[in-house]
Image (cartoon, grey):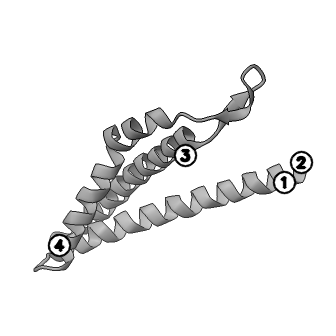
Amino acid sequence: MNALLIPALLILGFLAGSLFSFYLMRWCALVFTSTAKHGGDFLGPPRRRIVWALPFVTLLHPAPYIFCLVALVAFRQFHGPSASAWLWFFGAFGASVLLNGFRTASIILKLRRKRTLTS
């Protein structure tokens, strides 16, 4: 294997994982926003939901399709004769997704702790 191929696949896998986790978190935020109760000072108490937007957010956003594509490619590569290059790519991809997930979870926990201390 070429000496530059492994670092290049690691970098590409990490960048692809960062982009994937960004799209996945944005899609989750949109789904949460469309199902949460909305209100405000001029709208009154929170009781309205944007449920009508849920089919559009769920079906027209690229994140679920990207997730299915990644799962299909990973399944085909790991259950068949695969090159070690794909292992490096998917290893970096998974590390990036895990790193972004842990970072997001820590930020959410800090915000929740801050909110419970102030209320």
Please name the residue that numbered disc 3 is placed on. 32
Do callouts 3 and 2 mark residues in contact (Cβ within 8 Å)? no
Please name the residue that numbered disc 2 is placed on. 119
Q: In this rendering, which labeled residue sits more in front, label 3 or label 2? A: 3
- x 71%, y 35%: residue: 46
Q: Which mark is residue 15?
A: none
The span from disc 2 to disc 1 (Cα, nearest Å) is 5 Å
Quadrant of the rendered structure where residue 38 is?
top right
- The image shows residue 31 at horizontal and vertical percentages of 49, 44
Residue 5 left/right relative to 54 = left
Q: Which mark is residue 77?
A: 4
- x 43%, y 54%: residue: 21
Name the secondary structure under disc 3.
helix
Given residues 74 and 119, the one toward you in this image is 119
Please name the residue that numbered disc 1 is placed on. 116
Given residues 23 and 41, the one toward you in this image is 41
Nearest to N terminus: mark 2 or mark 4? 4
The span from disc 4 to disc 3 (Cα, nearest Å) is 33 Å
Note whether residue 34 is visible: yes
Residue 111 left/right relative to 50 = right
Quadrant of the rendered structure where residue 70 is?
bottom left
Q: Amino acid at mark 1?
A: Thr
